[in-house]
Image (cartoon, rainbow, N blue to C red):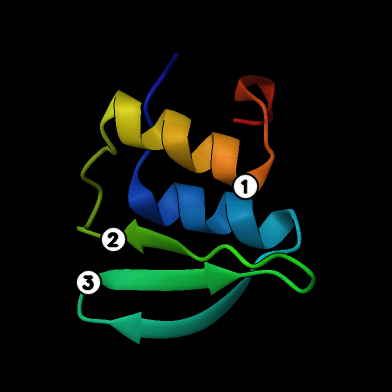
Amino acid sequence: MRSISGKDFARLLEKHGWSLLRVNGSHHIYGRAGVDVRISVPIHGKEALKIGLLRHFLKVAGLKESDL
């Protein structure tokens, strides 16, 4: 699995129907209508997300590795 930055993952979430609810420091909180889960994406410039965190985000968001 290739890693992507938090900024790129945030764009991916928005492309798949997630919307930005609020920003708390360097963390952007995303939500989706009809889903009780919130995703807090750390945006630290172009720093890549760690693989385990990225896998967790994909699972929670209902996305596949091929969506990257």
Residue 10 tag number: none
Q: Are marks 1 and 3 in contact (CB under 8 Å)?
A: no
Secondary structure of the residue carrying numbered label 3: loop
Secondary structure of the residue carrying numbered label 1: helix
| Up/down of 30 relative to 45, above or below | below
Mark 3 = which residue?
A: 26
Q: How far apart are marks 1 and 2 (CA)?
A: 17 Å
Residue at the limit of the structure toward the top, as seen here: 1
Residue occupying image coordinates x 20% and y 80%: 25
**Which of pointers 1 and 2 lies earlier in the amino acid sequence?**
2
Q: How far apart are marks 3 and 2 (CA)?
A: 5 Å
Q: Distance between the residues labelled 1 and 3?
A: 20 Å
Residue occupying image coordinates x 60% and y 22%: 65
Residue at the limit of the structure toward the front, as seen here: 36
**Which of pointers 3 and 2 lies earlier in the amino acid sequence?**
3
Q: Could you tell me residue 55's position as x and y percent?
A: 45, 29
Instruction: Give the quadrant of the N terminus.
Output: top left
Residue occupying image coordinates x 67% and y 21%: 66
- Amino acid type for the residue under numbered disc 3: Ser
Of 4 and 30, the residue lying toward us: 30
Q: Do the residues labelled 3 and 2 touch (CB within 8 Å)?
A: yes
Q: Nearer the viewer, mark 1 or mark 2?
A: 1
Residue 43 tag number: 2
Instruction: Give the quadrant of the C terminus.
Output: top right
Q: Could you tell me residue 12's position as x and y percent?
A: 60, 50
**Which of pointers 1 and 3 lies earlier in the amino acid sequence?**
3
Secondary structure of the residue carrying numbered label 2: loop
Residue 61 tag number: 1
Mark 1 is surrounded, within 10 Å at the Cα level, by few (under 14), some (14 to 19) or many (20 or more) other residues, namely many
Q: Is residue 31 left or right of residue 28?
A: right
- The quarter of the picture where residue 23 lies is bottom left
Q: Is residue 20 left or right of residue 24?
A: right
